[in-house]
Every structure is written in C-alpha cells, then in structure tokens.
Image (cartoon, rainbow, N blue to C red):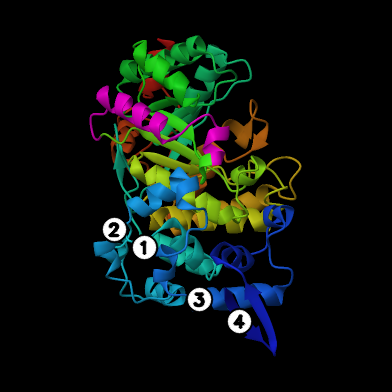
Amino acid sequence: MYQYTVRHKVYKFQDLKTLLAKASPYRSGDVLAGICAETYEERVAAQIALANLPLKNFLNEDIIPYDDDEITRLIIDNHDKTSFSLISSFTVGELRDWLLMNTTDNHSITAIETALTPEMVAAVSKLMRNQDLIAVAQKIEVVTKFRNTIGLKGHFSTRLQPNHPTDDNKGIMASIIDGLLYGSGDAVIGINPATDSPTIAYNLLQLIDNLRLQFDIPIQSCILSHITTTLQLINNGAPVDLCFQSIGGTEKTNSSFGINLNILNEAYDATLSLKRGNVGNNVMYFETGQGSALSANAHHLVDQQTCETRAYAIARKYKPLLVNSVVGFIGPEYLYDGKQIIRAALEDHFCGKMLGLPMGVDICYTNHAEADQDDMDNLLTLLGVAGCNFIMGIPGSDDIMLNYQSTSFHDALYLRKVLGLRPAPEFENWLIKQGITDKLGNLIPINSSNKLLSGLLG
C-alpha cells in the first residue's frame, strides 16, 4: 500500500501498478481501461508518492507476476545487480534529479542502463515535464550499424516507406527513387506489404536489393511481414537484411501477435547467420506503440505507457538496428489528440534511449484523431531537439496503403536544415557522389550530373 496526504485527504494506492497508473499523465487509453487518476489532485498525490519511492522497491514487487509472464521473467532475470549498486540508494525523484544534472552525461547514463528496469524508467518519466524528457534524451547517444552508421550525434536518419496498396513494383520503385532523390532512406527502406505473401515479400526484397547493388547504395532493406514469414524467406534464400516484428510489453500481447521469445530467438539467430551487414551486425527492427496491450485485452490493468516501456526489455535483448514507436497509429481511443500524442512520443523516445535503444518515432496520427499536421510539425521539431535517431519518410506524408498521416521527405529536410543535422555518414557520402546533395547537405537541382537518374534513364 502506498499513500500521500493532500490537505488532510489521504490518497491510497493499493500496489505499485496502481500507483504507476494513477501517476501517469492523462490519456484516453488509461481512461478506457478505468485505471487513471480520477482527479488532477489524485494524479499529483500519486506522483509525489512515486517520487518518494526507493528504486529498490521495484525489485521486490512485480506489476505482472513472475510466474505468469515471460517478459517479467526476462526483466528480473537479466537485471544487472552490479551496476544497480550505483543508484540503489536513489528514490524515483532522486533519479530524476540526477538525470537532469549538468554533470550527468551520456557515459553516466549508459553506465546504468542495465541497472534500470522498464518500470523504473517508466516511473521517472511520469515525474518529468516535456522539456525534462527532451533534455535527458538529448544527452544519450545510441549508435547502431549494418551497412551504415545510425544514431551519431549531429546526424538524423529516415526510414523510406514506399508502401503501395497492391504491392505494385513500379509504384514502389517510383516512391523509392523519389525518396532517394530527397536524401531519404538511410535508416532503412522498409515496406509494409499489403499482404503477408512470402512470394510478394521475396520479390520486393529482390527489387530493393537489385537497386542497392546496381548503384552501390549503403542502405539496408526490410519487408515488415510477420516474423515467421521472414524466417521462411531466409530459408528460401531471400536477400533479408533486417528481421522485423511488432512487440508488446506483456506475454499475452505478444501471443496476440503470434510470437514469443523463443520465436524471436530463432529469427535473431537466423538473420545474424546471413552476415549481410558490412559495417555492423545489428539485424533486428522492432515496432511498438502505446495501447497495443489494452487493445488486445492483455494489459493486466497496467497503464499503457508502462506496458510500452516493458516492450523495450524485449527489444534490447536483441541489439536492434532500429526501434520505432508508431505513436499515433493506434487511434484516439488510446491517444486522443495532438497533445497526448506529443507527450506519448516524448515518453517513448526518452524511455527507449534510457534503456539503450536506438529510438525512432513514426510521427503520425489517424484521420479520426483530434490532431493535424501542425501537431506533427511541433512533435517533429521536439524530437529533433531530443536527438531522435530516425523518423519516417513517406511521399507527401500520406501513406496510401495504411491510410494514416505521417512525415514526408520534405519534413526530414526541414529538420536537418534548421538543426544542422546530417544523414548517416556513409549514406551522405553516397548522396554527394551521386550528385544529389552538395557537401553542405543542400539538394542539387536535378541535372545530367545526377548519376542515380542518369543510370535509371540511360
């Protein structure tokens, strides 16, 4: 039992998961689940009680029982007790204060990332203003490698997302070329297929790989099919660079996705065995999103942001190249409006980086949410300042297959320009050699010196 008294009124919270839920900033998903604070005063009382809670308590109370959930077992069994000794005397509030100190830098934070459980990180995020989430995340550098280097300070990457409603090769190729000419695609060229057909996925992988080899492009590709389809593709000799899977923060959520840790282990080992990376061997790509556990009725009355952060325990086990919070995609039932989407994205980015993950964000909303492109522009700029590793690059920011609004090739150019950011170094060198950008990162008007177009048209 946890409690805090406000003006002679005692607020009681029966267990840790209740305290975490009541301390969460307001969002529609927790209202839908019936677990949020009933008043602003109750929320503040819960936040103060949470701030005074020793971090040690998180090691003695499972918010989902150890015997009932393999994610809980993963978290507890892999907790680094040695590095935890560095912060074992802290309360949640003291951890927040320490993170915000000027003397706490990237090295200091990465030294404790294995000491932190997802619940600890979720807890400290609930005590932070948006600027706190940005200030701490900006300190952290998480670098990953496959055919290029992603996450370096001063660099900012994009996933080129050339989705097509019928998986038409010509339509997809047109979007890929369009994106490359705008300097997009260094994180990955990633296609959400319209179906989970292994044949179509194989053909799309071959399409991208042929283009990569023809122009010696330092990129990686991924077809975002189910992990079992990717395993089948690997067994059939397809040119698989990255293995993709959506993941959630509870065993029941992942069961609804048709996966478990054993399947992830198998896929990770199979993808690693291909040895297709020439700069590094980070081969996994995970996507997450607040609300997935609730939508699957698999949340165990845990608030959606804490469930989301628990998913990051799975991701860090496999040393991924990319982790992407598809923050507004699930709909207003879980994140109602632009304000809630912005807050959730900053939380996810902060929590992922605190746990050592290469975080990107799909800055997006569905057409029935109370949000618009101005909200996304605000979030894009905030995430750029926070040091987000990558975002989406979609023709016109309108995904014609998934039917939602995201960010465009032009949006990435805007962010690079105003914040002085560059693409991944290997990809930037390729853009310069192709005559697509100059050495200052400016786009060069298309002319005969553009080797990509000349090669395609010649």
Alpha carbons under labels 1 and 2: distance apart: 22 Å
Q: Residue at x 39, y 32 (%)?
A: 262
Q: Which mark is residue 51?
A: 3
Q: Nearer the viewer, mark 3 or mark 1?
A: 3
The three-letter amino acid code for the residue at tag 3 is Ala
Specify the quadrant of the image occupied by residue 231: top left
- Marks 1/2 in contact by CB < 8 Å: the verdict is no
Q: Nearer the viewer, mark 1 or mark 2?
A: 2
Looking at the rendered structure, which numbered label has been put on residue 4?
Answer: 4
Q: Which mark is residue 139?
A: 1
Number of the front mark, 4 or 1: 4
> Left or right: where does residue 289 sit relative to residue 33?
left
Per the model, the C-alpha gap separating discs 4 and 1 is 33 Å
In the rendered image, residue 412, in percent from the top left (x then y), is placed at 50, 43
- Quarter of the picture holding the C terminus: top left
Q: Assess whether residue 292 is covered by the magenta stretch.
A: no
User: Sequence order check: which comes first, mark 4 or mark 2?
Assistant: 4
Residue pictured at 26% horizontal, 34% vertical = 281
Which residues make up the magenta segment? 252-280
Q: Which amino acid is tagged 1?
A: Lys
Specify whether residue 149 is in view.
yes
Question: As drawn, which residue projects farthest toward the front?
Answer: 67
